[in-house]
Amino acid sequence: MTGLLIGIDDTDNPTSRGTGHLARTLLAECVRRGMKPVGVTRHQFLIDPAIPYTSHNSGACVAIAGGRGVEEAAFAFDFVAAQAAEGSDPGVCIASSDQVDRPVIEFGRRAARQIVEMDEAFRLAKAAGITLKAMGGSGLGVIGALGSVGLRAEGNDGRFIDLPGLRELPDRVEARTFALLGIRLEHYNGPRTPQAGDAYLTLGWARPRLVAGEPVLVVQWSKQHNAWIPADRKKSRPLE
């Protein structure tokens, strides 16, 4: 994917809407400004008592197709700072996809399984020519912001919490509906193979995985619903 990536993290507090919701609001603002949306992905980082986080320690990345350069998205710094919840520690990262090098991708991978430091995040961003800023509080969100950009650029981590048309899907759809949105279906091995005319239920929550840079919805057959349903289930407090 060629375009712009905007990573954000630590924008919430225990009573506010989550980082995912702010990322979707940011995508809507990008669209309002004439940018072409690709979607928003959620990326999970290490859960550890030594790491301060609000609920799930996940960051988000807004992806924009094409664009006229990183400067076009620079408004996101002030936008996130203004929209972030009181007491949060927001970080924002903006990069063109071709700026994201292997060290930044590896940083995102490591942040998913071990403790990493803010100093390293700033050092790697500077080396890659990526703009990374702390926008309030401790600024600890720069870790997840850079990590989200790295993982989104690699294209094999996280899930889409927004992409054009995803949240407008009705509960019952046909396979071609997903194809029109650019979502590839992956049928989980089970008692049934997909057949023409099969029904697909979103159950109000379809969040495709990010696989090889594309949205992939894993589905499984449900005898109860006599239809294919998403294999991934909604968490107790999704940051969306």
Image (spheres, rainbow, N blue to C red):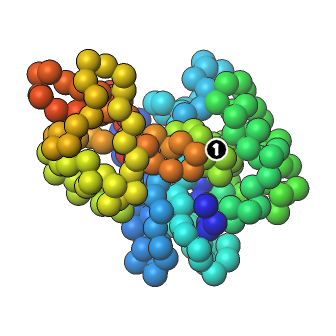
Which residue corresponds to mark 1? 151
* Category of crowding for the residue at label 1, using alpha-carbon neighbours closer than 10 angstroms: few (below 14), some (14–19), many (at least 20): many
Q: Can residue 89 be seen in this snapshot? A: no
Left or right relative to 216: residue 127: right
The x, y position of residue 34, in whole percent, is: 46, 81
- In the rendered view of the protein, which quadrant contains the N terminus? bottom right
Left or right relative to 180: residue 33: right
The x, y position of residue 114, in whole percent, is: 71, 24
Quadrant in the rendering for residue 156: top right
Depicted 73 relative to depicted 92: above or below:
below
The x, y position of residue 129, in whole percent, is: 82, 63
Q: What amino acid is at disc 1?
A: Leu
The x, y position of residue 80, in whole percent, is: 52, 60
Q: Residue at x 53, y 42 (%)?
A: 211
Depicted 177 relative to depicted 78: above or below:
above
Q: Can residue 185 be seen in this snapshot? A: yes
Quadrant in the rendering for residue 126: bottom right
As rendered, which of 215 and 25 lies closer to the eye? 215
As rendered, which of 104 and 125 lies closer to the eye? 104
SS under mark 1: helix
Quadrant in the rendering for residue 14: top left
Q: Residue at x 23, y 33 (%)?
A: 228
As rendered, which of 193 and 165 lies closer to the eye? 193
